[in-house]
Amino acid sequence: MISPTVLRNKPVPQRRSLCISYVPRDRSQRSSGSSGAVNADMRYHTVVYPGSTGDGGASVSPPRAYLDGKSHAIPRLPLRSQPLRVPVHVHIGKKGEGEEKAGRTRGRSGVTQDRPFSARMCLLDAQPSEEMPQTERETEREIERLGLDQYPWGQRVANCNKYKYKELYMFDKGIGPQGAKALALVLPSMTALTVLGLSNNMLGDVGARALADVLPSLPGLTHLALAGIDITPLGAGALGRALESLTNLKLLDLSDNDLGGLATDDLSRALTHMPRLEWLLLSNAHINAAGMDAIAWALPSLTWLQRLYLGHNSIGEVGARLLGQGLPVRLTHLSVEDNSIGDTGVTLLAQSIVGYSRPLTCLHMLDVSSNGIGDSGAKAVATSIKTLPLLREVSLNSNCLTFGGAWAVARAKPRECRCEMKGNGLGFLSKILLRVLWRDTHT
């Protein structure tokens, strides 16, 4: 499972790898092989330098191209220049030499022949040739992922449909409505795609509708990250209707968008078609009590849901009560931070967590920070967490607790549980006492 942090901010790997395109063999070009090798046809492949340092006139470190165990140095090439054509000889060695390592097959004449050229046989890498064995082992895995969040995406998307990429990351690339339309022309041909990350772009409603038109052609998607794409309920509704066809989704991130109005109704209907969903991220999505009612209606159908993030919305006390009525029993992480639920809302929610015939005994994390909770709400939380043996983190930051409420929570939590109660205005002596008597209590 890929976490939201990973999906939104995927780190730039040290290895600079990119699937490279193949130009068919040019039989008119001949060259002598290396040291005793007979003349052989030359194969060419196009080398596109990955990455950009942000300096238009800068150069990148010269990588090396590897083919069938051979290392080929590539000269330094300025960024944004024409692709470099690098010759790769067809090596014809002695009988049986390096057949297994290079992946060659033996012909009828007894001379080893190269297997057909494929993108999986090549890897652009800045590492020295001594590390080639490890590179060969990882080529298969690396070639399945295209991190377009690391490279200028315009040139790369054009070749996406030539290879069976499984993961496509394009976070924070400044893609607007027109870029979304261009991407929508490519996505239907990427039938093997399982991960699509477009968070933090300015797709808008126009781009969202263009994306919604092609989502049904990607039934294999398991992770979809569309956080912060600048959509209104109009675009969110179009996406919600398109999501009904993605029955294999395991992660859905629609945070930092406007899902108000009727958009939550479309989303709730789509959720009922996602029985395998494990992560649902709807933080800062303009969800009020009415929207929470629609989403809570679909929650019981998400029998495999493990993580639910609803922070920074405005569900209020009514929304907290509705949420408590539909929580799936396999839930491990629940966040309702900054939702103005107050003492009444958190009490209803806490009672729902342990009041079912099947309580949420799998709960690992509960976050009710910034909800205006006082001592009565804290004591209700304390009563509920006594029956949660797997709880490892409870957060009551930025509320209105006094020493009495903080003491009740600290006493009730499991020994291994970390308790966060910062920003509650507790006195200095109260903080010291809580930290001394109860480990993993942070005030």
Image: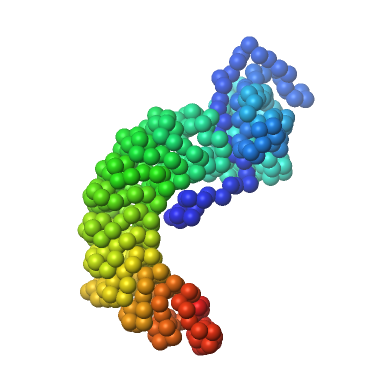
Q: Is residue 188 above or below residue 272?
A: above
> Is residue 395 among what the camera can see?
no
Q: Is residue 414 above or below residue 99?
A: below
- Residue plotted at (42% across, 31% down): 178
- Residue plotted at (51% across, 31% down): 154
Q: Is residue 77 left or right of residue 322?
A: right
Percent of width and height locating residue 196 = 42, 43
Q: Is residue 7 left or right of residue 342?
A: right
> Is residue 152 among what the camera can see?
yes
Report the front residue among 54 and 271: 54
- Residue plotted at (63% across, 29% down): 80
Q: Quadrant of the N terminus?
A: bottom left
Percent of width and height locating residue 257 = 37, 49
Report the front residue among 177 and 323: 177
Residue 94: quarter of image? top right
Q: Is residue 389 above or below residue 37?
A: below
Picture colour scheme? rainbow
Percent of width and height locating residue 198 = 44, 43
Q: Is residue 416 left or right of residue 59?
A: left
Residue 191: quarter of image? top left
Percent of width and height locating residue 49 = 63, 33
Report the front residue among 292 and 7: 292
Q: Is residue 45 above or below residue 416?
A: above
- Residue plotted at (33% across, 54% down): 286
Instruction: Check the image and name the residue furthest to the right.
Output: 35
Count of numbered circles in the view: 0
Q: Is residue 45 left or right of residue 374?
A: right
